Structures are given as C-alpha cells and as structure tokens.
Amino acid sequence: MKEVPSKFVSKMSHDLKTPVGNAMMYAELLIEDLEALASDHPDLSDNLDPLASYCRNAHLSSLKLIYAIKSWSYCYHLQDDVFTLDKSEIDLQSLMQKVMDRNSILIKGKSLDVTMQYESSVRKMMASAEIVDMIMDNMLGFLITLTGSGKAIGIEITDAEGGQVKIRFIAEPPAFKEALIDNYCGDYKLADKCIPEQGVLKPAGFPLIFNNLVLRYMNADHGVDPEDHPSRSFWLNLPVS
C-alpha cells in the first residue's frame, strides 16, 4: 500500500480549507447584512428570512466540510505521530450548547428532539477546545444524519470515575451498525481503513475514525452500549486535565 505522508495531507487540507473558509466567511457576512436589513425594514422580513436561512445552511455546510478535511488530516498526523494538543481552560457545557445551536438548522430541518442533560459537577476542564468541539460536532452530526425525522437524540453529561466526565449520545437503532461501531471503537491501524493500493481513507469514515483515534491519543475511554441497554449510546469519558 502506498503511504500518504502527513505533510502532503496537511498541504492538501490547507489548500482545500482556504476556499471553503472563504465561502463560510462570505456566508457569514451575508447573514449579518440580511439581518440588519430585516431589522431596518420589518416589512421585508418575510422575503429576507428565507435568504438568511439559506446562508446559514451554506455557512454550516462549509464548516462541516472544513471539519471533515481536518479530521482526514489529523488522522494522518496521529498515524505519523506528529499530532499535538494545545490545552486551555474550556467550559464544557457552554461548548456543548454552541455545538447544538450551530446544528439547529439541521435539527429543525428533520424536526428532531435534541436534548442535553448536564449533571456533571465539572464546569471547567483543561483540553483542546478545537478537538473537543470537533469530537462533539462529529458525533452530533453523525447522529443527525442517521436519525429519522421526528425522532430524538439525547446527550447526557455526568461525572465518571478518575476525575473524568462521561458524555453519552443516546441514539436510534439505525446508528448502531456494525461498521459504524467498529469505526468508533474498533482497535485497528489507520491502514485498515484505507482503500487498497491508494492509501487514502475510505469515504464517509473520517469523523468516527478521527474520534476513535484522537480519543485513544487522549487516553479517553469510549465505546458503545450493548444491544440490551435501555438507552443505547455512543459514549466517551473525557479527562478534565
């Protein structure tokens, strides 16, 4: 199998992120202009609101693509042992709420009931804000895609042993396919998830594969509840320091 060096992947991901980032920036500027115009001219709000909604969708789609590109790139950084984490103090509950708010347009589009129960005593933790945000967005986005319209997704955050925080993403049965569970918690090398003779990751596997690899790097336990669990979930335990 041909190797794809992390330096090459980093260069490619940077080249891809630049135009996508521009599209996201312009969408954000359009949203601000449309909201200001609607505020100044309430009589036009019925016409401007749909345009603002389209721009929000374009903005979110651009961010999702950037996260997919980063997940792809970071997977190779992890494989080549050149991945590093810059830790800072983050508010986990606030971060989780921002992830939910960011995905609200997708949640509303499928009429999903997404709830969060934050019952952990931990309010602040030392971690990489970018990586934790990517992990949570990957998980929620993955479940939104696989959850049927009108169904529910639950997020439960509680204390875990050893000064960790346990996060459970409670999902509907379609999410618990064997291949997806293996992507998230299987013990494998990155090469096992690559297309033979090409050395590139198989499509659609980046988010869960990245979550699996980076959680292992963080020494964070993660897995999937057994089939007979009353509220089956994809779960992870995050260290708080």
Image: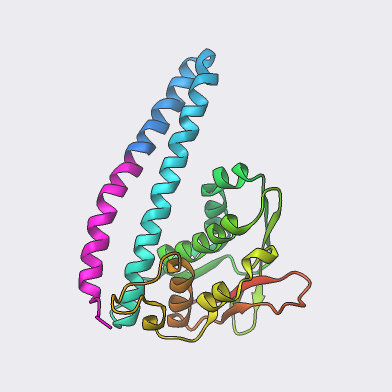
- Residue 64, placed above or below residue 127: above
Name the colour scheme: rainbow
Residue pictured at 43% horizontal, 24% vertical: 36
Q: Name which quarter of the figure residue 86 lies in.
A: bottom left
**Would you say the magenta stretch is mainly helix, strand or loop?**
helix
From the viewer's perspective, tell me whether residue 104 is left or right of residue 158: left
Residue pictured at 25% horizontal, 69% vertical: 9
Residue pictured at 43% horizontal, 64% vertical: 129
The range drawn in magenta is 1-25
From the viewer's perspective, tell me whether residue 154 is left or right of residue 53: right
Q: Name which quarter of the figure residue 109 lies in.
A: top right
Q: Residue 160: where, in percent of width, then height?
A: 64, 79
Residue 239: tell me if it is visible.
Answer: no
Q: As rendered, which of 93 and 230 lies closer to the eye?
A: 230
Residue pictured at 39% horizontal, 61% vertical: 68
Q: As rendered, which of 132 and 67 lies closer to the eye?
A: 67
Q: As rendered, which of 141 and 33 lies closer to the eye?
A: 141
Q: Residue 108: where, in percent of width, then height?
A: 62, 43
Q: Is residue 179 magenta?
A: no
- Quadrant in which the N terminus is drawn: bottom left
- Residue 91, placed above or below residue 103: below
- Residue 22, placed above or below residue 52: below
Q: Is residue 8 magenta?
A: yes
Q: Residue 220: where, in percent of width, then height?
A: 52, 80
